[in-house]
Amino acid sequence: MAPTAEGGSASYPVIRPMLATIGPLPAEGADADWAFEAKWDGARCIVNTTGDGTVRLVTRAGNDATTTYPELAPLGEQLRGRPAVLDGEVVVLDARGRPDFGLLQRRMGVVNPRRTARLAMEYPVHLVLFDVMYAGRSLLHTPYHERRSLLAGLRLRGPNWSVPTYLEGRGQQAWEASLQGGAEGVVAKRLMSPYTPGARSPEWRKTKHLLTLDVIIGGWTEGRGSLAGLPGAVLVGVQEPAGLRYVGSVGSGLSDRERHELAQYLGVIRRPRSPFTNPVETPGPHHWTEPRLVAEITLSGWTSAGRLRHPIWHRLRPDLTHLG
């Protein structure tokens, strides 16, 4: 049995979030046993309440975030008299109503009451609730579809929280809807799946939308350890009328062979100063190069500051050598 919070004084168990594996959506014709939800680009949050009108918010890492998001405190009143543990995602929506992780980062980890109150006005969060693991009794072994029905029955709706619906057996429709709605992707959950705290289960499967982009290499930073002397990451930009705008660094996905090849290529086109029109925030030292080489990368989107989100190296594009 899971321990109770606050040394046993609270009437709810401490439950860690269940995690999804990365993989493709169930194939069409095999998706009747699955539910499909939007994958939200935010921060995981477990909501705990004894039913006394208050809530305690806990991050995936186990940190208390109750004071960080004061606008979620009124959720406790809707749960008064109903001890519960809920699972959800905290997001900040942009002007188009789409999750923006860059905006959420301005809220994360802030605990000063004056500052959190000001940020709650400037960048209000929204809590997307998608599971219930305790409602006066443990629901860990209750099938997903029954837990979702119980969650809907709680009728939780407010200015800063909601319980979005899910699609049953219609993976392709969910995929297209998530694209149109600006979601990060889709999470497929087996209808009969139990809730396994802290486990990364194949019963939950997440599939992200990825964008492909050609970027121009304008420099690199050195790797560490066995990568000393080789590019640990390349500094990349996109060409705009005003010049080459820095958009981020890319290191994930580079093989050892590609790092050695890049070291040779970039060593030939060194330059003393940055080719970018804007500052490069990545810690140095920086090695600058003439903006000649073009690379193809994938990314999950853009931050509010115009930087690459989750960029992954795909390949060098010698057919698209940049001539300035």
Image (spheres, rainbow, N blue to C red):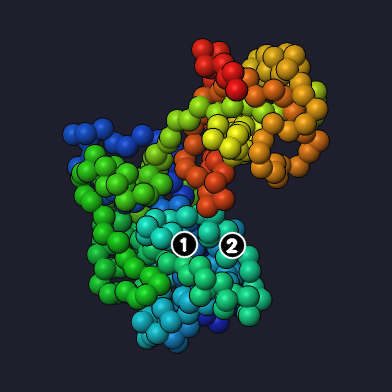
228 vs 194: above or below: above
- Circle 2 is placed at which residue position? 106
Name the element at disc 2. Answer: loop
Measure the alpha-carbon separation of dots 2 and 1.
10 Å
Tag count in the figure? 2
Q: Residue at x 47, y 55 (%)?
A: 100
Q: Residue at x 46, y 75 (%)?
A: 72
Q: Residue at x 24, y 39 (%)?
A: 172
Q: Residue furthest front?
A: 241
- Circle 1 is placed at which residue position? 92
Q: Quadrant of residue 241?
A: top right
Give coordinates of residue 103: x percent, y percent.
53, 59
216 vs 263, left or right, is left
288 vs 301: above or below: above
What's the residue type where badge 1 is placed? Val
Toward the viewer: 270 or 67?
270
Q: Residue at x 77, y 31 (%)?
A: 273
Toward the viewer: 187 or 218?
218
Q: Earlier in the sequence, mark 2 or mark 1?
A: 1
Toward the viewer: 52 or 291?
291
Q: Quadrant of residue 236?
A: top right
Give coordinates of residue 154: x percent, y percent.
29, 74
What's the residue type where badge 2 is placed? Arg
One can see residue 137 in this view: no
163 vs 299: above or below: below
Look at the numbered discs 2 and 1 and tell me whether their residues touch, using CB distance below 8 Å: yes
> On the rendered image, what quadrant is the C terminus found in?
top right
One can see residue 78 in this view: yes
